[in-house]
């Protein structure tokens, strides 16, 4: 996979990870200043800068806002398509079509539908409905005043965020990215100066779509050690719980059953305890996923690697016990 990935040109090939940013507030236009500073220091044109912010406290709230915004955009896009489709239909009156082209029954149905739409478009009912939507919004929506208040609250929270100490810088070409990384190491040795801090570059090791932005915060060695120890203990406890609470009862019933004269446990007993083991397996896999999420990986790729390792070990234990 690594060899195949190296032969392909993707987004990460133009991107460098920059660390060492000072503590800056969300209302500071740091992206513009960083873009100019890096361009001037490296001599390479910067396309854009994506700063990492510490928003763990507001993660669920910001995620909901983004999802609502995407849903609203999708709804507006569908409405726009419907409007264009309706306009096209209005310009093609089926009642004026060639009587020889369709059957009389099909033409009658088409004409009836067109007249219903036409009556609604030019009726007072439509005007009242549009006026109601303009004043109160679509059914189930909030009022404009509430939207403005919620928008102001979100803006205030965004402005209060603190820079997480790193960012991603996108260059025009991969060669420019590589040259900027080398220059930041060789020429300045200690990095590039920015607002009293020294910035260091490294090649981005993940695609933009796989970045877990909520985890892009400063992670000390002690912090990582605590996460690793906590995850290991949780995994071991979960495995022990699965063995003794789910698998052991099933194994006991199977081993203690009477197999003389070709007898076997009943179908109900087999099915019941099999489902218990399946439920235990599902619980174990959910635990593996939760542990991987809590490790604080900054890339989805690394998170998936850990999850697959934990998942594989659990499956191997299950096979060995069987």
Image (cartoon, helix red, strand yellow):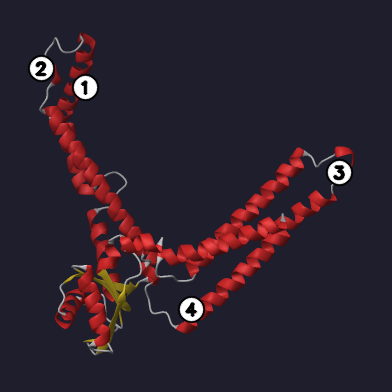
Residue at the spot x=35%, y=71% of the render? 55
Instruction: Compute the Cα span from label 3 to label 2.
Output: 83 Å
Q: Is residue 197 above or below residue 243?
A: below
Looking at the image, residue 301 sits to the left or right of residue 153; the answer is right
Give the mark nearest the N terminus, 1 or 2.
2
Q: Nearer the viewer, mark 1 or mark 4?
A: 4
Q: Position of residue 185 (x, y in %)?
A: 27, 85
Q: Is residue 260 above or below residue 45?
A: above
Q: Nearer the viewer, residue 78 or 217?
A: 217
Residue at the spot x=84%, y=47% of the render? 257
Give the mark nearest the N terminus, 4 or 2.
2
Instruction: Compute the Cα span from label 1 to label 2.
Output: 14 Å
Question: Number of labelled discs?
Answer: 4
Image quadrant holding the C terminus, namely bottom right
**Residue 88 visible in the snapshot:** yes
Give the mark nearest the N terminus, 1 or 4.
1
Q: Which residue is mark 1?
A: 113
Q: Nearer the viewer, mark 3 or mark 2?
A: 3
Q: Which residue is mark 4?
A: 224
Give the mark nearest the N terminus, 3 or 1.
1
Residue 132, by quadrant, is top left
Q: Which residue is mark 3?
A: 259
- Kindly state the secondary structure of the residue where label 2 is placed: helix
Question: Is the Cβ of the residue at disc 1 closer than 8 Å to that at disc 4?
Answer: no
- Kindly state the secondary structure of the residue where label 3 is placed: loop
- Kindly state the secondary structure of the residue where label 1 is placed: helix
Question: Is the Cβ of the residue at disc 3 closer than 8 Å to that at disc 2?
Answer: no
Q: Position of residue 111 (x, y in %)?
A: 18, 18
Residue 300, by quadrant, is bottom left
Q: Nearer the viewer, residue 43 or 286?
A: 43
Q: Nearer the viewer, mark 3 or mark 1?
A: 3
Looking at the image, residue 5 sits to the left or right of residue 186; the answer is right
């Amino acid at each position: 996979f690594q060899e195949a990935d190296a032969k392909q040109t993707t987004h990460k090939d133009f991107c460098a990870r920059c660390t060492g940013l000072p503590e800056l507030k969300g209302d500071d236009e740091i992206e513009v200043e960083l873009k100019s500073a890096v361009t001037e220091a490296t001599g390479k044109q910067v396309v854009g800068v994506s700063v990492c912010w510490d928003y763990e406290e507001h993660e669920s709230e910001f995620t909901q806002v983004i999802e609502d915004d995407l849903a609203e955009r999708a709804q507006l896009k569908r409405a726009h398509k419907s409007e264009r489709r309706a306009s096209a239909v209005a310009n093609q009156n089926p009642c004026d079509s060639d009587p020889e082209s369709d059957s009389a029954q099909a033409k009658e149905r088409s004409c009836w539908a067109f007249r219903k739409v036409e009556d609604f478009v030019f009726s007072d009912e439509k005007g009242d409905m549009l006026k109601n939507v303009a004043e109160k919004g679509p059914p189930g929506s909030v009022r404009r005043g509430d939207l403005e208040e919620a928008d102001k609250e979100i803006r205030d929270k965004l402005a209060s965020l603190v820079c997480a100490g790193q960012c991603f810088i996108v260059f025009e070409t991969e060669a420019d990215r590589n040259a900027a990384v080398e220059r930041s190491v060789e020429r300045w040795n200690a990095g590039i100066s920015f607002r009293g801090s020294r910035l260091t570059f490294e090649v981005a090791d993940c695609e933009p779509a796989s970045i877990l932005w909520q985890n892009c915060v400063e992670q000390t060695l002690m912090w990582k050690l605590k996460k690793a120890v906590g995850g290991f203990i949780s995994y071991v406890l979960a495995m022990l719980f699965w063995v003794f609470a789910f698998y052991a009862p099933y194994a006991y019933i199977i081993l203690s059953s009477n197999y003389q004269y070709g007898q076997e446990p009943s179908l109900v007993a087999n099915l019941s305890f099999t489902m218990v083991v399946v439920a235990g397996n599902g619980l174990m896999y959910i635990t593996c996923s939760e542990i991987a999420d809590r490790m604080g990986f900054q890339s989805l790729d690394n998170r998936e690697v850990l999850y697959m390792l934990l998942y594989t070990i659990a499956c191997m234990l299950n096979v060995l016990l069987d």
